Amino acid sequence: MWEHSVAVGLMSQILSKQITGSEDSTLYTAALLHDVGKIIMGEFVRDELKKITTLVYENGMSFLEAEETILGINHADLGGKIAEHWNFPVEIRDAISYHHRPDLLEKEDKIMPWIVYMADEACLMMGIGSSVEGLAQRAVSQLLKKFNLKMRDLERSMVMLSDDLKSARDLVNII
């Protein structure tokens, strides 16, 4: 889980440079914490995880839909509620709450949830994260169009992430 969270944080910065021309520490924080709802849920839903994965594999549901069906809430919504409880800024809360569905935001001009979504999808495509979610992920072609990027831009970002993630792993191993 830590590797996926760090990878999404790092990828958000790589993508932010491509899209906006600069890094954003608030975006990094939101990306790093995007799955905080999973961390909290994980302590309480171990027995339910089998049911969730069954719905994903056998019924073709998305991971979020399966969580909602079994638990009554998904990890993104729970994460947003946690971020609100912790008094995080609205932009971080929205990025956490909508990191799987930024299209549901009322204001389409909010870029942070879109970048976190794209970073998360890229990491799942690379196999950094839950294999269950990776099987249920949505196509990134619309995201690339939205930000006027080509697949080669995303592939280049993935290579950069690989290098950055290796450095992060080396740092953790030193500690």
Image (cartoon, rainbow, N blue to C red):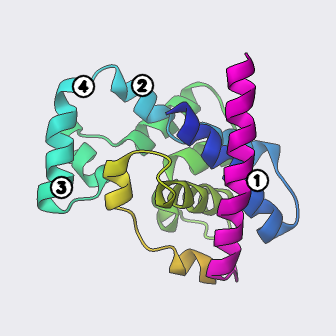
Instruction: Give me the C-alpha separation between circle 3 and circle 1.
Output: 32 Å
Q: Residue at x 21, y 45 (%)?
A: 53
Residue at x 64% of width, y 70% of height: 155
Residue 69 at x, y percent in the picture: 18, 46
The tag earlier along the polypeptide, 2 or 1, is 1
C-alpha span from label 2 to label 1: 25 Å
Q: Earlier in the sequence, mark 3 or mark 4?
A: 4
3D distance between C-alphas at marks 2 and 4: 11 Å
Cα–Cα span, label 4 and label 1? 32 Å
**Is residue 154 covered in magenta?**
yes
In this figure, which residue is indicated by the disc labeled 1? 13
Residue 92 visible, this angle: no
Disc 2 or 3, which lies upstream in sequence? 2
The amino acid at mark 3 is Tyr
Give the amino acid type for the residue marked by disc 4 in the picture.
Arg
**Left of 59 or right of it: where is 67?**
right
Q: Is residue 129 visible?
A: yes
